[in-house]
Image (cartoon, helix red, strand yellow):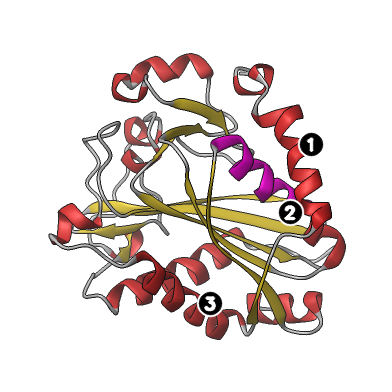
Amino acid sequence: MMDLPNRVANSAGSGIGRLISLATADAAENMAIDQSILDSVSISGVPVLRFYQWSEPTLSMGYFQRFRTRSEHAASFPIRCVRRATGGGAIVHDQELTYSICLPVAPGKAWVRDTLYQQTHQAIADALACFGVHAVPFRLSGACIRTKEENSRFLCFQRRTEEDLVVSGYKVLGSAQRKTRTAVLQHGSLLIHASRYAPELPGIGELQSFSIPVQQLIEKIVTNLSAGLHLDWNEDELTDHEKQMASKISQERFTNAAWTMRR
């Protein structure tokens, strides 16, 4: 089976991707931009890497979660809620860094989900190591035992899968994917500090007793992903078409109560 870097290079052709610089937006806009980029990459075949934060504390629920289960987490009641297009548990987006990466996939080619998780999470782990943070995949943590009860918890960061990054036994990075016929979107959250809307989840700052400069961390991640995926990332902006599509998707889906409460 062809490895991920070769599949990306063969699909993208040039080995050049677009890097969308760190930006802050609200819940619906962030989710709509990710969807717009997925649609764009499905057509263009050009990889896109994006980093973003949230203009206000937000709870994002996984696509398959029941909306009524929000009652299981009282601390996040006061904040805005959005439903992602990807699966997994709920995430409190507050004191964290979110990334999304979208890659073309050759039609008809087999897709190994864990390969992209491993590539991106290793790039982030290596970037964290530059700041003295030892983060490892849960499967290598020496405590890779999961229970049925843990996997059903409401919050994503109280669940652990093999590729999640852990620091001192606590999960600090989790990701989720959505795939179309010709592209895959993966986005994930890195807990920089604990949020008062999820105080039970320590971030890197609490676990290591120091803060990481986010922009410098991003630069390290980009460098690592360039080497790991054999892609050069050129700084770019969202196209007018991507912005227009994101606005349309936001209105139709992510600001729509019927979408949020659909399950």
Decide: few, some or many residues near mark 3? Use Cα within 10 Å; few <14, some 14-19, many ≥20. many
Q: Circles 2 and 1: CB distance less than 8 Å?
A: no
x then y, percent, for residue 261: 60, 17
Q: Which of 11 and 44 is in front in this view?
A: 44
Residue placed under numbered mark 1 in the picture = 248
Q: Evaluate whether residue 1 shows in this view.
A: no
Question: Counting residues from the N terminus, which is met first, the one under dot 2 or under dot 3?
Answer: 2
Looking at the image, residue 23 sits to the left or right of residue 214; the answer is right
Quarter of image, res 128: bottom left
Q: Which of 18 and 69 is in front in this view?
A: 18
Looking at the image, residue 206 sits to the left or right of residue 24; the answer is left
Residue 222 in the magenta stretch? The answer is: no
Q: Evaluate whether residue 97 shows in this view.
A: yes
Question: Whole-Å distance between the Cαs marked 1 and 3?
Answer: 31 Å
Question: What residue sits 45% from the left and 36% below the top?
Answer: 89
> Secondary structure under badge 1?
helix
Question: Whole-Å distance between the Cαs marked 2 and 1?
Answer: 14 Å
- Please tell me whether mark 1 or mark 3 is closer to you in this view: 1
Question: Counting residues from the N terminus, which is met first, the one under dot 2 or under dot 1?
Answer: 2
x then y, percent, for residue 251: 73, 29
Quarter of image, res 108: bottom right
**Which of the image's four quarters has the N terminus?**
bottom right
Residue 225 marker: 3
x then y, percent, for residue 137: 35, 63
Residue 38 marker: 2
Decide: few, some or many residues near mark 1? Use Cα within 10 Å; few <14, some 14-19, many ≥20. some
The span shown in magenta is 27-39
